[in-house]
Image (cartoon, grey):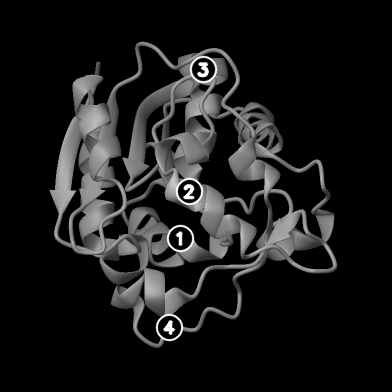
């Protein structure tokens, strides 16, 4: 049995992993899918200082307090920023790192260094009364694969999450897989290439960026296969 820790992306929450969580638990694995500080059910905790380091602490402390070992640490989209920072501090507790169409940063890089177009786009999404928060992007425009999905549970998120660079220290010695979603619009082509050049296994999936919702079985199958791998 493995322990899966699933980290969601921008504007989302642990709820977004529900389809995959059920599939993993049906195989007998333990699954932890927290909502990051200031998002979803923890939106009331958002402050101007909530940033990437806050979210790295969220997940690192979860792993520490739950006293779990053999962790398969998974990040979707922005969650890739988080799991990279977490992995550098808890590598001994990890079995595998999995990036689901996600940011794969180097020390000193922020999210906008990997997707520069977001820097200007986010400025237009700032809330007038709280400009340190950015509202969710228009779902149908950016994630057409979702159709008329209910996005009412998405919440604004602190802009510092994308402004703050990854702290010094990168994970080493932990096996990694990058799931590259290739259906257009495709946001992480260059990042997938970087992951491959860094020695990660790159799996392609003919799905849009929100594959965790549209293709849960295929994503879960990759996660389960990675959990079976041993160094």
Closer to the eye: label 1 or 3: 3
Give the Cα distance between marks 1 and 3. 24 Å
Q: Secondary structure at mark 3?
A: helix
- Horizontal placement of 195 versus 43: left or right? left
Residue identified by numbered label 1: 17
Q: Sort mark 2 into few (<14), some (14-19) or many (20+) by Cα contacts within 10 Å.
A: some
Mark 4 or mark 2, whichever is nearer to me: 4
Quarter of the picture containing the C terminus is top left
Mark 3, residue position:
88
Q: Secondary structure at mark 2?
A: strand
Question: Between marks 2 and 1, how big is the CA–CA gap?
Answer: 10 Å
Q: CA distance from mark 4 to mark 2?
A: 24 Å
Q: Are marks 3 and 4 in contact (CB under 8 Å)?
A: no
* Image marks 2 and 1: residues in contact by CB distance under 8 Å: yes
> Could you tell me how far apart the alpha carbons at marks 3 and 2 are, in whole angstroms?
21 Å
Q: Earlier in the sequence, mark 3 or mark 4?
A: 3
Q: Upstream in the sequence, badge 1 or badge 3?
A: 1
Indicate which disc, 2 or 1, sits on the residue closer to the N terminus.
1
CA gap between label 4 and label 1 equals 15 Å
Q: Earlier in the sequence, mark 4 or mark 2?
A: 2
Q: Can you give x and y, in whole percent of width and height, for residue 104 in the image?
A: 39, 33
Task: Say which residue appears at 81% left-offset and 41% top-offset.
Answer: 49
Q: Which residue is mark 4?
A: 149
Residue shown at 70% from the left, 40% from the top: 51
Question: Residue 116's spot in the image, x, y percent?
Answer: 44, 43
Q: Of marks 3 and 2, which one's residue comes earlier in the chain?
A: 2
Residue 75 in view here: yes
């Amino acid at each position: 049995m493995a322990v899966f820790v699933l980290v969601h992306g921008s504007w989302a929450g642990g709820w977004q992993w529900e389809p995959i969580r059920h599939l993993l638990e049906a195989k007998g694995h333990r699954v932890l899918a927290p909502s990051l500080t200031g998002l979803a059910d923890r939106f009331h905790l958002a402050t101007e200082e909530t940033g990437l380091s806050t979210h790295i602490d969220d997940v690192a402390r979860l792993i520490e307090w739950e006293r779990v070992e053999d962790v398969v640490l998974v990040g979707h989209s922005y969650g890739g920023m988080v799991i990279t920072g977490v992995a550098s501090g808890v590598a001994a507790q990890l079995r595998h790192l999995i990036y689901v169409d996600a940011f794969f940063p180097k020390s000193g890089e922020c999210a906008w260094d990997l997707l520069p177009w977001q820097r200007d786009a986010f400025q237009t999404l700032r809330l007038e009364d709280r400009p340190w928060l950015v509202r969710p992007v228009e779902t149908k425009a950016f994630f057409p694969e979702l159709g008329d999905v209910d996005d009412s549970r998405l919440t604004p998120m602190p802009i510092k999450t994308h402004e703050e660079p990854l702290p010094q220290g990168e994970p080493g010695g932990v096996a990694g897989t990058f799931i590259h979603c290739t259906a257009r619009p495709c946001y992480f082509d260059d990042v997938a290439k970087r992951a491959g050049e860094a020695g990660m296994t790159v799996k392609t999936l003919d799905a849009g960026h929100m594959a965790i919702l549209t293709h849960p079985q295929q994503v879960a199958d990759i996660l389960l296969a990675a959990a079976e791998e041993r160094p």
